[in-house]
Amino acid sequence: MNTSVTTQKDWWPSPAKLNLFLHILGRYENGYHQLQSLFQMLDYGDSLAFAISTDNTEIKMDTPLEGVPDDENLIIKAARLLARKANCNKGAVISLDKRLPMGGGIGGGSSNAATTLVALNYLWDTGLSEDELAELGLSLGADVPIFVRGLTAFAGGIGEDITPAPQPEQYFLVANPNVHVSTAEVFTSEDLPRNTPPMRWEDYEFEKTWNDCQQLVANLHPEVANLLQWLVHYAPSRMTGTGACVFATFSDYTLAEQVRAKMPEAWQSFVAKGVNRSPLLDKLEQQR
Ligand SMILES: C[C@@](CO)(OP(=O)(O)O)[C@H](O)COP(=O)(O)OP(=O)(O)OC[C@H]1O[C@@H](n2ccc(N)nc2=O)[C@H](O)[C@@H]1O
Ligand SMILES: Nc1ncnc2c1ncn2[C@@H]1O[C@H](COP(=O)(O)OP(=O)(O)O)[C@@H](O)[C@H]1O
């Protein structure tokens, strides 16, 4: 008799974001930059599953991430941080289904950390509030709180000062020029503009904004410039975050897919819908 039992994994979404614009206003004394941005949540991303243990406190990946040792994986860091903060005596074996390019400016690592905090807080029953999770997340990266909150939002400060900003329904063709851009490298460059005047959120219009990192990154990596030049032929296009991914905006899904079909194969790409509420929030609500 076959006694093996297969239990289906319960997957938690870890969505990508786009920075629809990114203005750099200045630099704080600690080296971090004061910015203004619009973080658009997408319905597309990685997924994480958590097997909880109640008899030991071990936290480990069962799907190691190529090039990222477990001790440096933001998923493991987030889980350990939560366990410490909440004096948790449980463990977890974590699976990651990675779809998002790493270091692409679409927030994969930060989103993985936020999903880990939100999911384990529920599965371990550690009872932290959303504010407490966002604060914990900030110590892992400037982008983690916005993924914990899970809303399309304007962000100020270093990215943690969040104002929800629902956007009209749009589709995004997101493409990866296959170059890795380090966020730290961009922010330490002498050539980065750092003097964009502050903008009132109510004055936001896509056409009147830009990404202050785009020119620098396009100069450093001609592939980014080539990709932008190709996309802008079809739709308004811009780089996200500190790069290297680039997006083009469409009001129609089919049109976005048609342009994607024409794209040279060297550029990996996907079409995603912009959402005002992250799929992570929906997943959490389904549990309750
Ligand atoms: C600027 C954004 C826009 O989304 O770039 P992307 O990483 O998404 O491309 C993010 O806020 C990045 O957030 P995140 O990637 O979490 O940043 P962190 O790990 O905290 O910091 C990475 C590096 O960027 C610098 N940094 C980050 C945020 C900020 N407001 N000013 C900075 O100068 C830090 O000095 C650090 O060396
Ligand atoms: N779980 C993770 N997923 C992705 N990257 C991770 C993860 N843990 C650590 N990292 C590191 O964080 C870096 C930035 O990753 P990511 O958040 O995907 O890019 P970006 O901040 O440009 O959107 C990666 O190059 C990688 O070294």
Image (cartoon, rainbow, N blue to C red):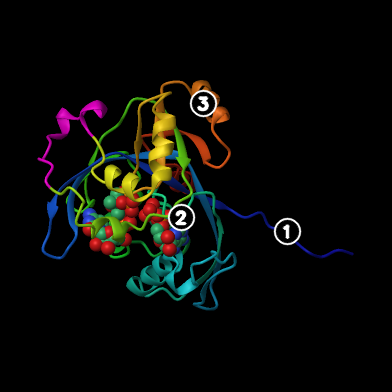
* Residue labelled with disc 3: 259
Q: Which mark is residue 102?
A: 2
Q: Is residue 9 visible?
A: yes
State which quadrant residue 20 falls in.
top left
| C-alpha span from label 1 to label 2 | 31 Å
Q: Which of marks 3 and 1 precedes in the sequence?
A: 1
Q: Which of marks 2 and 3 precedes in the sequence?
A: 2
Front: mark 3 or 2: 3
Query: What residue type is disc 1 on?
Result: Thr
Query: What residue type is disc 3 on?
Result: Val
Residue stretch rendered in magenta on the structure: 195-209
The spot of residue 198 in percent (x, y) is: 10, 40
Query: What residue type is disc 2 on?
Result: Met
* Residue labelled with disc 1: 6
Q: Secondary structure at mark 1?
A: loop
Q: Nearer the viewer, residue 84 or 182?
A: 182
